Amino acid sequence: MKTIYPSLFCFAVILMAGCQKSINEEMQTGTLKVTFKNTVKGNQMALNSGNYSNQHGEQYTISKFKYYISNISVTGVPIVPNSLYFLVDEGNPASLSFSFDVPVNKYHAVSFTLGVDSTRNVSGAQTGALDPLNDMFWTWSSGYIMAKMEGTSPQSTVVNNKVEYHIGGFAGANNVLKTISLTIPVSTISPVEIREGKTSEVFIEADFDKWWQGTYDLKIAGNPAVTHPGALAKSISDNYAGMFSIVDIKNY
């Protein structure tokens, strides 16, 4: 009987003409600087010395103005980890600006979260921007104050004519957490143009005058102090969600 040996097949390895270079390109990035400008009716806010009036003619001053920012994105591209929070505090100039590395591109929108998410609210006292020493944490009830204004007004019936709005709440219908989405008005302002090794700065105005009006008509005489979660705090948060706008961009 004839023995048949299996054939041995050689698999040809096709070498591509011109060896392909190993590509290990790092993503090109530039710097995006975000600067918040707190104003009242378009004028720079002046703590303790500015005298202001709302749409009802009620006079007031501001001694404290703070709010939490997180989840910053440009044109849908997240640039800040969800775990990173910033406390914008008019009394601390260093807190009004922060910078990030961003992929080279042109961007036409900026978004962020105003407030502290539910997970952080039930995690107890924390560190950094969320440290209770920043005076934005309710020790009597676990939870963060998302935005705070304190001052005085002759229309206030509180002792020493105080005005206090400590806006918080993260559960159910009274959740005051807000997603702020801002489109750059390209007809008047150039887009954010991130270039390698360069800096672009976005100036975001927060006009406190919007606290008084919007979906809810807030009067100092009727409500000079709001210091706990609830329907009124939610209504005020609906108002102040509209206080932000992009007013300038500088590509350096």
Image (tube, rainbow, N blue to C red):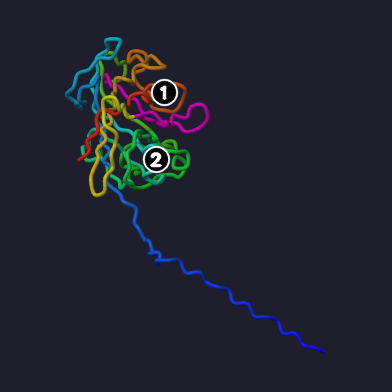
Q: Residue at x 29, y 34 (%)?
A: 191
Image disc number at residue 23: none
Q: Position of residue 37 (x, y in %)?
A: 24, 30
Report the number of discs.
Answer: 2
- Look at the image and tell me in which quarter the C terminus lies: top left
Three-letter amino acid code at disc 2?
Asn
Magenta stretch holds residue 10? no
Q: Give x and y (percent) for residue 78.
A: 40, 43
Q: Residue furthest right?
A: 1
- The magenta region covers 160-183
Q: Secondary structure at mark 2?
A: strand
- Label annotation for residue 238: 1
Q: In this picture, is 92 found above or below 225?
A: below
Could you say which is closer to the camera, residue 240 or residue 74?
Answer: 74
Q: Which residue is mark 2?
A: 71
Quarter holding the N terminus is bottom right
Q: Does residue 161 lie above or below 83 as drawn?
A: above
